[in-house]
Image: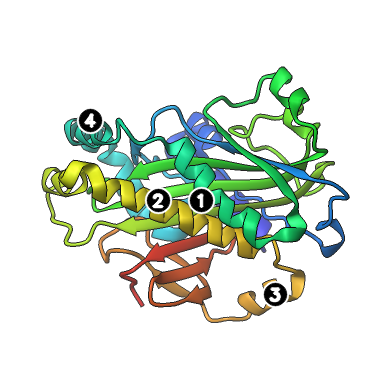
Amino acid sequence: MRKSVRRIAAIFLILVLGPAVASAEAYFPLRILLSPEQRESGGGRHMVIFVEKETINSRVNPVGLSSVTGGGIVPALIDQTIEGSRKQKAEDPLAEVRASLADYDLKISAVAAADHVKKNIEWLGVDRIVATDIDPLPPDDVSAITDAEVLTLQYRLEIEPRFDAIKLWAHAELVDKELLKELSLKKIKKKKTTPGLKFSQDFICFVPLRGAKGDINENAAQWIGDGGKPIKDSIDLALAGVARMLTTALAVVEDDAKIVKSRKAKRVGYSAKAVENYYGKPVSEDETGTVIETQFGEWVYYYWPTQK
């Protein structure tokens, strides 16, 4: 059934937007649970975090799969038709947001957040955490890693089209070090049977702007107020959210996954008008936000406002 849904979605994208767009944008999350037998590495593990060279970008999503499965195909197509206009309108406020982040080092913040994973999963045995904006890693850097296994975390940080929330996407993998030499993380074409691939999962974290307005310039002004403190704090919050999800996900076994799948699905989002409202099975919910699991195994975390 799942394969059929994926196939239909891919065919639809090709018919509507053409094969070039479908091949470039159609990305299907790959989820592989870490088996209990593979938890202990017999030694230490290295953790490598990949970030983009530009700290934050505005979201331009020409019918990526997350919109197809989460926001629905119709709003995604509408988003595609107005993409050019949105991009042009977002240039100036995006430049202001980026300027407010001139003294913010995403790599340092990402490493600090990942320390939560290291401290809370002793059996993972993470010896060292490093962050880079170079992907794939140069051969010499891979050779310098002395641990046999590497936990990778790839980040992409975006601000929503209305500038009313930030979205942090992350792809995590636990792999044999040799696999880093063969495949770029940005070309995720692995299969569940890929040798050396022990864990794989996608995470998405949304942090909304409190008191957001309808105008993106007004929202941008709020993000960059007080020396950019709101946007910096929100990025830190998103990084912490992904780290907590990853910490939980690494310990999930098949029985846990079945429990989540048995629950009644719900739709959640930071705004009733947001394209990126997602539909999935609740994983957890507390006073800070809601985590749901989509039909493809992504975990999506919304801080604060949720749509029941």
Q: Earlier in the sequence, mark 4 or mark 1?
A: 4
Q: Please say if 147 is above or below 172.
A: above
Between residue 113 and residue 35, name the one nearer to us. 113
| Residue wearing tag 4 | 95
**Horizontal and vertical percent position of residue 199:** 73, 52
| Residue wearing tag 3 | 256
Q: Are marks 1 and 2 in contact (CB under 8 Å)?
A: yes
Amino acid bearing label 2: Asp
Amino acid bearing label 3: Asp
Q: Earlier in the sequence, mark 3 or mark 1?
A: 1
Mark 4 → mark 1, Cα distance in angstroms? 26 Å
Mark 3 → mark 2, Cα distance in angstroms? 28 Å
**Horizontal and vertical percent position of residue 252:** 70, 67
Q: Residue at x 33, y 52 (%)?
A: 234
Q: Please say if 62 is above or below 248.
A: above
Mark 2 → mark 4, Cα distance in angstroms? 20 Å
Q: Nearer the viewer, mark 4 or mark 1?
A: 1
Q: Are marks 4 and 1 in contact (CB under 8 Å)?
A: no
